[in-house]
Structure formats: C-alpha cells, structure tokens
C-alpha cells in the first residue's frame, strides 16, 4: 500500500478523535459525571496519539537514505511508546479526579441527554477502531494497530461508563460514579503498558512470530536435496518491515553461478510469501567444518 493510503488512516483517526472529544466533553458538562470526565480525558490521549501516529507514519515510510540504509520503519515504535506513556499520564489524571469525587460526591444532572451524546461517540469509535485494526494488520503497522486497540479499549470503557452513569441516575448512589472512573483508570493503564511492551520488544529486534518462522522453514526445506542444507536462520521485525538471514550450504564443487541461481530462487520464493521482507542469504560449502562456525551472531575464527 502506498504511503498516502496508510497515512490517510492517521488523518481519519485525528478527525474522529476531535469529534469524539467534542461529544464527550459536552456529555461531561451536561452531567457533571466524573466517569464521563474520564472518558473525555481518554479521548485527549487518543487525539495526541493520532497526531503522533501521523508524523511517525510519514517518517517510517521515508525511503532509505545514507544515514538509515535499512529504512525508517522503526519510527513507528516511538509513536506507540508515546501513546502508551500518554495513556499512563491520563490514567493518573482520571484517578486523581475520581478520588476527589469519592470524598466530595456530586449528583449527576441531565443523565440521559448526556448518555445519548456519549453513545454517539462510542458508536463512531467502534467503527473507526475496526477500520484501524483491519488496516494495521493488513499493512503490519504497529502504529495503526496501537491506535485501533486504544480506540477499542475506549469503546469498552465508554460502554461501562454509560452503564454506570445510567445505574447511578436510577439508584441515586453517587459513589458509584467515581468508583467506575477508578476502574476505567486501571483498565486503560493495562492497555498503555501492553502498547509500550510491544513497542519495546520491537526496538529490541524481536524475532518474527513462530508461525512465520515455520513458514520460512517449510520454504527452505523444499530446496534441501542433493547435498543442499541450511542453518543460521535469524529474523527480526521492524514495524511493517521484516528482516531475515540464512546460510545455505551446497556441495563445494558447485560453480558460483549455480549457487547464486539457487539463492535467487530461495529469496524469490520467500519474498513471494511475505510482504515487505528483506532476505539476506549466505552461500557456504557443506563439506567445510568452518561453515558451522559462523551461525552465531559473533563469528568464531580459528587460530592460525
């Protein structure tokens, strides 16, 4: 997918966040509910995250340059870290407001009008969350996926808040409002930590999922006959870009051209099975014992 079509989803997220923030702020002022205030504050986090995502997606999709020969795809992880950190800040703000309301309870005003406004924002959130999650998975974009997960979390918390505010207005038990807000704060803290964890793992060059490694092994095994083998398979995920390297062992009497042709076939096969995969292959003679000395990240050299 082209850069423009990916970044347009960030613009969609920004526009949606502005509309939902407006609706939830109105709902809070109509009701005075600290639960709906927490919902509005979370929308602030979503807006900041969407703006950050836009800049990071643009940076991530820049072509490689002299200073970044492997591209800029890791920029997406910084967007997710910012999003997770901001969620934690918002959670603290929600918790502070909720604790204050525990000691100074206030009645909820115009609850059903406020809930109607909040419900519109929740429905819109659910639709956009589905779009972002679908496109994030399709494009291997951790930024879009993080935004989608955050929005979906907001949908669930909003539903809980709406149900809670309705319960408070029916039972007149005012303390339920700040209790619900505290539960929301705890819930979104977990979301923020999950988003940050995934980003940190990406920055640490985490390997591809087991399912994808098995798929790569299956492709390589097709070529393992007549003295051909492989070892030293390594992989890493860099947001939307995947990287892998492998050593292909062939009979030592093969010509350079024959070995090169085999590597071309293997690389083509893998690239046809994975989108945005950078494949590095290394040709070695299968009879030479030294071929087994370089499968670790630091190659071992025999003393001369």
Image: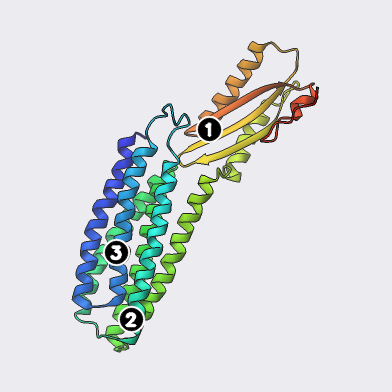
Can you say whether 97 is above or below 4 in the image? Answer: below
Q: Residue at x 29, y 89 (%)?
A: 172
Task: Measure the C-alpha gap from mark 3 to mark 1.
Answer: 38 Å
In this picture, residue 225 sits left or right of residue 116: right
Residue 137: x, y in percent? Answer: 43, 46
- Up/down of 84 relative to 140, above or below: below
Quadrant (top left, top right, bottom left, bottom right) of the C terminus: top right
Q: Residue at x 36, y 43 (%)?
A: 56
Mark 2 to mark 1 CA distance (whole Å): 56 Å
Front residue of 262/295: it is: 295
> Residue 67 vs residue 279: left or right?
left
Whichever of labels 3 and 1 marks the residue nearer the N terminus, that label is 3
Image quadrant in which you'd find residue 189: bottom left
**SS for callout 2:** helix
Picture quadrant where residue 9 is located: top left
Q: Quadrant of residue 301?
A: top right
Are there few (<14), some (14-19), or many (20+) residues within 10 Å of tag 3? many
> Which structural element holds mark 1?
helix
Which is more N-terminal, label 1 or label 2?
Answer: 2
- Residue placed farthest to the front in the image? 304
Residue 142 shows in the view? no
x then y, percent, for residue 33: 27, 77
In the depicted view, which residue is nearer to us: 296 or 157?
A: 296
Query: Pointer 1: what residue?
Result: 273
**Residue labelled with disc 2:** 100
Contact flag, marks 3 and 2 (Cβ < 8 Å): no
Tell me the tag on residue 122.
3
* Residue 35 located left or right of residue 31: right
Residue 64: give x, y in percent of width and height: 42, 29
Whole-angstrom CA distance, mark 3 to mark 2, is: 26 Å
């Amino acid at each position: 997918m082209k850069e423009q079509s990916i970044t347009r989803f960030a613009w969609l997220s920004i526009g949606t966040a502005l509309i939902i923030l407006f609706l939830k702020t109105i709902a809070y002022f109509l009701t005075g509910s600290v639960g709906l205030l927490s919902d509005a504050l979370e929308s602030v986090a979503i807006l900041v995250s969407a703006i950050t995502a836009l800049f990071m997606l643009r940076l991530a999709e820049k072509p490689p340059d002299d200073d970044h020969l492997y591209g800029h795809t890791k920029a997406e992880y910084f967007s997710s870290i910012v999003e997770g950190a901001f969620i934690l800040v918002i959670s603290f703000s929600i918790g502070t407001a909720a604790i204050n309301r525990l000691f100074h309870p206030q009645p909820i005003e115009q609850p059903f009008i406020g809930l109607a406004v909040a419900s519109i924002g929740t429905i819109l959130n659910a639709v956009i969350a589905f779009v972002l999650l679908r496109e994030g998975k399709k494009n291997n974009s951790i930024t879009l996926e993080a935004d989608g997960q955050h929005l979906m979390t907001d949908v669930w918390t909003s539903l809980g808040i709406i149900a809670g505010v309705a319960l408070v207005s029916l039972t007149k038990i005012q303390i339920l409002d700040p209790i619900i807000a505290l539960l929301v704060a705890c819930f979104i803290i977990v979301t923020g930590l999950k988003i940050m964890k995934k980003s940190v793992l990406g920055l640490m060059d985490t390997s591809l999922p087991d399912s994808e490694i098995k798929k790569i092994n299956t492709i390589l095994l097709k070529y393992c006959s007549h003295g051909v083998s492989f070892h030293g398979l390594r992989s890493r995920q860099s947001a939307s870009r995947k990287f892998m390297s492998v050593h292909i062992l062939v009979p030592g009497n093969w010509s350079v051209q024959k070995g090169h042709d085999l590597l071309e076939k293997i690389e083509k096969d893998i690239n046809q099975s994975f989108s945005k995969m950078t494949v590095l292959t290394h040709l070695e003679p299968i009879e030479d014992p030294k071929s087994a000395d370089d499968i670790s990240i630091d190659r071992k050299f025999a003393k001369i």
